[in-house]
Amino acid sequence: GAGVSQSPRYKVAKRGQDVALRCDPISGHVSLFWYQQALGQGPEFLTYFQNEAQLDKSGLPSDRFFAERPEGSVSTLKIQRTQQEDSAVYLCASSPHLENSPLHFGNGTRLTVT
Amino acid sequence: GDSVTQMEGPVTLSEEAFLTINCTYTATGYPSLFWYVQYPGEGLQLLLKATKADDKGSNKGFEATYRKETTSFHLEKGSVQVSDSAVYFCAPSKTGGFKTIFGAGTRLFVKA
């Protein structure tokens, strides 16, 4: 079946612009996660949804970052007034929220802020 | 808070050499433990997992044993291949995959 799909694959934004990154999880997966991966580093947790409820947003680095999943399926990560330090790969992952289920990752969106 | 420490890379080995990548973690509760792999140009994917003490996860010739007493989950393979060249991430997780945390990753190069 289809995996986790993220778009766009690459995004270049000028500093100060707003961006929106989309994630289409595996159908039926209850849990959805966003991670930020800087070059040469491991993924850092940003936020977590269970269906449409955002249960943990403790990893969002500032109030410029906002995520939503209004119908419990597709999710959007929005970054307002982008800064150079926002340049990274943004990964989306979904999971069926069963005991000990692994995460299924998309290929990520590489954001470059110039 | 919860954290994970894994061996720094890059690790460079010749084909058929033995591989160990060390991983230790600190976590509240009783996490499940995962290794994920990222091949060049591809997304992160599950390599193996273990969900309770003394469990051994295995896949593609890789193994890791859940050592609760030492809070470790070291990855091993007896004979690496060029195709194993990738970045490997150790990742403890709360029950249900909630808020998995990742190590910094260990890049492995295998030479023919």
Image (cartoon, coloured by chain):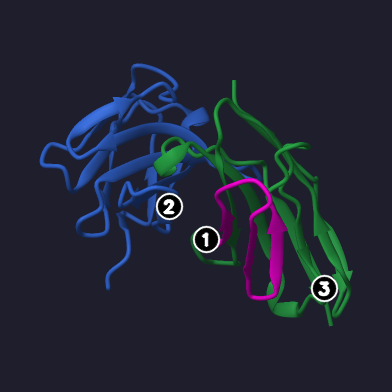
| 10 Å crowding of disc 1: few (<14), some (14-19), many (20+) | some
Kindly identify which chain the residue marked by label 2 belongs to. A
| 10 Å crowding of disc 3: few (<14), some (14-19), many (20+) | few
SS category of the residue bearing label 2: loop
The residue sitting at 30% across, 52% down in the picture is: A96
Q: Amino acid at mark 3?
A: Gly
| A72 left or right, relative to A10 | left
Separation (CA) of disc 2 from disc 3? 27 Å
Q: Which residue is mark 2?
A: A103
Instruction: Identify the image quadrant of residue A59.
Output: top left
Separation (CA) of disc 1 from disc 3? 19 Å
| Colour used to depict chain B in the structure image | green
Q: Amino acid at mark 2?
A: Leu
The residue sitting at 16% across, 42% down in the picture is: A72
| 10 Å crowding of disc 2: few (<14), some (14-19), many (20+) | many
Q: Which residue is mark 1?
A: B46
Direction top: furthest residue: A63
Q: Magenta part of the protein: which range?
A: B47-65
Provide residue B70's location: percent of width, then percent of height: 78, 37
Looking at the image, do the residues carrying marks 1 and 2 touch, with CB atoms under 8 Å apart?
yes
Q: Which residue is mark 3?
A: B78
Looking at the image, do the residues carrying marks 1 and 3 touch, with CB atoms under 8 Å apart?
no
| A31 left or right, relative to A43 | left
Locate the N terminus of chain A and report the quarter of the image it occupies. Answer: bottom left
User: Does the magenta run of residues contain A113?
Assistant: no
The residue sitting at 34% across, 16% down in the picture is: A63
Provide residue B109's location: percent of width, then percent of height: 78, 67
Q: Amino acid at mark 1?
A: Leu
Provide residue B91's location: percent of width, then percent of height: 59, 45
